[in-house]
Image (cartoon, grey):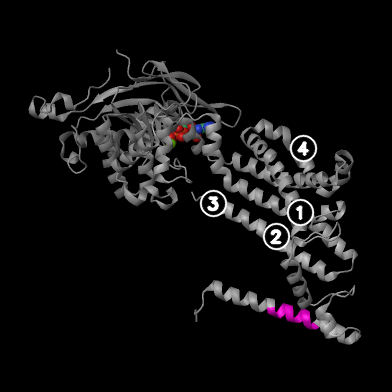
Amino acid sequence: MDLLSENKRAAIWSIALLIVGLLVWEMSISAQAINTGELTEYELLTGAGTAKAGVPPPSEVAVKAWQELSNPFYDAGPNDKGIGIQIGYSIYRVLTGYFLAALIAIPLGFLIGMSSVAYKALNPFIQVLRPISPLAWMPLALFIIQDSEASAIFVIFICSIWPMLINTAFGVAGVREDWVNVARTHELGAFKTAFTVILPAAAPTIVTGMRISIGIAWLVIVAAEMLVGGTGIGYYVWNEWNNLDLTSVIFSILMIGVVGMLLDSMFGLLQRAVAYTE
Amino acid sequence: MAKSFLSIEQLTQRYPDGKGGEFTVFENASFGVEKGEFVCILGHSGCGKSTIMNILAGLSDPTSGVVKMDGFEVSGPSLDRGVVFQNYSLLPWLTALKNVTFGVAARFPQWTKVKVIEHSTAFLAKVGLTGDAIHRKPSQLSGGMRQRVSIARAFANEPKLLLLDEPFGALDALTRGTIQDELIKVWSDTDQTVFMITHDIDEAILLADRILLMTNGPMAQVAESVEITIPRPRNRTQIVEHPNYYAIRNHLVQFLGQRSADLSDQTSGANNRPVDVRIDLTDMAEGDDPEPASVLRAVEG
Ligand SMILES: Nc1ncnc2c1ncn2[C@@H]1O[C@H](COP(=O)(O)OP(=O)(O)O)[C@@H](O)[C@H]1O
Ligand SMILES: [Mg+2]
């Protein structure tokens, strides 16, 4: 019965699902093409030149992906940059906004987690500000900052701050009193206690917050770049939609997914590094 | 009366009872512990043993009263008073060795890293932890091994006073026995002053120079101080043959079974010092004291 391990069986199922999915997609598109009778199979495969508003088959997306990924960093003017450059812009904005948020959220979370007065004083603000869609800040940011680049970074900042802040506060407040007592009986100062006892104890919760934040930041950057335009993967998707180039749209959607997955798995590794069992 | 090394004076602890009033855990408790002495405190659960220990450790403040060590009033925790908690006192993200070096480095900040590791490894070896085990995290160690690490950490810091709160409470009888032996071994090497909470009578007789008996709470008192008149080195299989063993044990069982409850209703006086109890049948049996005087430690008072 159990000739193959669970993982291997799961992998076989994944591949089978992928193949079936792609085949169904491919065939439904070719069936459409035959029905309309306008496009030959050859035209579909080469795909180039003609701006058509039809959904492309996967083979066409694969060809597009091959073209784009074999030269990802070309730069032929404001409306024609390689996918690598566009993603690079997006990652730069996400990381900048994200690390600025971490710089504030983690120390502030420590404060809130350690002092119930600070918690009670700041909690009303957090509760009101947190549910605001990050994009709602965009007009205000554009008006005050007067710079679309910085405004996009601000939007990332504001959306990634909350999960980190709340998880840090939660993690710090939940540190076992026995461990704090160990620090106290060893006469560790406030900073030493924070770094050698509270931080490692709360790290799994903090990193979980960081992981949620990076996920949200990556979701929001696409929308933010659609609004501010210029560069970035969000702008790229929108631009290709305006060009009615659905092949590029689908390709860039896939790229957004892949980059998001990579960002997430980096934090997954970090999470494993700071995990401990009691 | 000469001042003890550790002197607890008129210690009172009250807590809000949750109904707007207060309840008194203990009132005006006073007793002393001598340097190098191993004192156990026995009493039913909830009588306030941990509360006393946390005050001695400086982790919490009493409602009133003072604790003096070496003539100085205790305020706040200090490296001079090491603590072994019942559970969870190891940092789970550090290996056994790092849990010990963590303490040693805090105690001896001027030491080199190599010296800290050497010292820590030596103390882990004293409680029977060597080789691969010291590089494992607490979650990968058995309950007994974890408590050994706690004990090694506390002794490695060479505090003036070592406080242990039911350190073997969560262990099975066999493991408990081995670690008790190890504790005795480390203690006799260092001549550390130890104050230990337990609810196990046999453990207390095996380990202690003196046993403090607490009545039931609320308004608990440290009612008696029983000297253990059994010479060291003690061995769990041999002490039961000592003529004093059952006499002391019966006294303790009787106290915990009956008198701890009878005495608990009595209101306390202004200064409750425990009554000194010395049970020694060897005097009666042979007319003179067969034990060398130096083996028996003097009772305070
Ligand atoms: N922080 C606290 N607030 C209120 N009551 C407490 C607190 N700590 C201990 N108590 C009460 O004090 C009594 C003694 O507790 P404790 O010292 O833990 O007992 P023991 O260690 O002897 O079992 C118990 O009735 C307990 O409920
Ligand atoms: Mg207790």
Give the foreground label among 4 and 3: 3
Tell me which numbered mark, 4 or 2, is placed earlier along the sequence.
4
Query: Whole-Å distance between the Cαs marked 2 and 3?
Result: 21 Å
Q: Is residue B28 above or below residue A194?
A: above
Q: Which residue is mark 2?
A: A259
Count neighbours of disc 4 (C-alpha within 10 A) and say few if under 14, some if 14 to 19, many if 20 or more. Answer: few
Tell me which numbered mark, 2 or 3, is placed earlier along the sequence.
2
Labels 1 and 3 positioned on one and the same chain: yes
Give the residue at x 78% y 57%.
A86
- Respond yes or no on whether mark 1 lies under 8 Å from ligand 1: no
Image quarter of residue B237: top left
Q: Is residue A39 magenta?
A: no
Tell me which numbered mark, 4 or 1, is placed earlier along the sequence.
1
Tell me which numbered mark, 4 or 3, is placed earlier along the sequence.
4
Query: Whole-Å distance between the Cαs marked 4 and 3?
Result: 33 Å
Do residues under tags 2 and 1 come within 8 Å of each other at their CB atoms?
Answer: yes
Q: Is residue B146 above or below residue B50?
A: below
Give the residue at x 63% y 50%.
A208
Label 2 secondary element: helix
